[in-house]
Image (tube, rainbow, N blue to C red):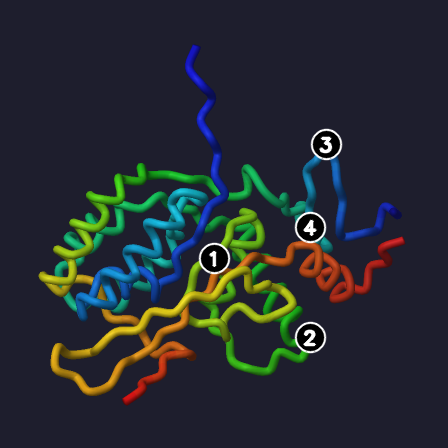
Amino acid sequence: MDKPPIIKTKLILDTNIISYASNYPVERQDKMLKIIDNYRAKYDPVITDYIQFELLKSAENKDSELLKKLGLFGKLSTNEAIILMAGVLHGVYKKAKIERKINDGDLIIATTAILSQSLLLTADKDDYPHPFFEEKECLTISFKEFKNSHTTSVIPIYLFEPNQTKTLQEVDKFFKIPTS
Amino acid sequence: MSDNTNLKTSKNQTFINIPNFEPIPIGAGTVSVSGATVSAQVLGRELRKAAKDNIVPLPQETSGQTSHN
């Protein structure tokens, strides 16, 4: 009898992670690919259709080739519930006095992670604020921009877990609906 | 828990209730997964090719990058 497939937790790779994994310098690219590969043992790396949109929007040419590359990843689909909840999350962040500008795309990606119970890998911690997202791990990638460069650049890579309970509580408070 | 609460659990399914909208389910069924993930070797090879052909846009500025001499 066939063993049932092991369902792993989804790991959403943010737009910047796909960019780092697909661009020079080689040292940064290799280290990013290694991180993704290591996480594959525990998680199922995916992108969302919104991440696909962001990458296509920024691409200058060769869109069909880009689509082919993006087809290598499993994909989570954005739906009406995610768009609705992303709008609500904006108000919830504001009420929690998270003042920094978080753009619509990051709200949609954040909501996709919350609703799909996925983890999120990103290089930009400001887009996924505490306490709605908890930092599970932080890795760093150090690399030289050019072969003979005298400086070493360092990028932090964060593994975030959505704090679903906290988010639900804050949505409750946002609409002032009693919980008991 | 009252009937008014936003957080409802039914048969291990949790919903977010936004007034005047259908409850939003948390977890399976909220989003669909499509496309097959490929092996790490294929993914690595294809993304290295992408860098060579310069087809994936560079990341926008992120909050954490630093440089050291």
Mark closer to the observer (1, 4): 1
Mark 2 or mark 1, which is nearer the start of the sequence?
2
Q: Which residue was labeled with disc 2?
A: A96
| Numbered marks: total | 4
Q: Look at discs 3 and 1 and give the one toward the viewer.
A: 1
Residue B52 falls in image quadrant? bottom left
Considering the image in quadrants, where does the C terminus of chain B appear?
A: bottom left
Q: Viewed as shown, does residue A158 lie left or right of A173? A: left
Q: Residues within 10 Å of mark 4 (few under 14, many from 20)?
A: many
The 10 Å Cα crowd at callout 2, few under 14, some 14 to 19, many 20 or more, is few
Chain containing mark 2: A
In terms of secondary structure, where does tag 1 sit? strand
Q: Which residue is mark 3?
A: B11
Tell me the kind of residue under disc 1.
Leu
**Marks 3 and 1, how far apart at CA:** 27 Å
- Asked which secondary structure carries label 4, the reply is strand
Q: Which residue is mark 4?
A: B16
Q: Along the horizontal axis of the image, is B37 left or right of A144?
A: right
3D distance between C-alphas at marks 2 and 3:
31 Å
Task: Kindly identify which residue carries mark 1.
Answer: A120
Most foreground residue, B69 or A102: B69
- Discs 2 and 3 carry the same chain letter: no
Q: CA distance from mark 1 to mark 4?
A: 21 Å
Q: Chain of mark 3?
A: B
The secondary element bearing badge 2 is classed as loop
Q: Amino acid at mark 2?
A: Ala
Horizontal and vertical percent position of residue A35: 35, 56
Contact (CB < 8 A) between labels 3 and 1? Answer: no
Q: CA distance from mark 1 to mark 2?
A: 21 Å
Q: How far apart in space, not on screen, are marks 3 and 4 (Cα)? A: 15 Å
**Which residue is most to the left?**
B53
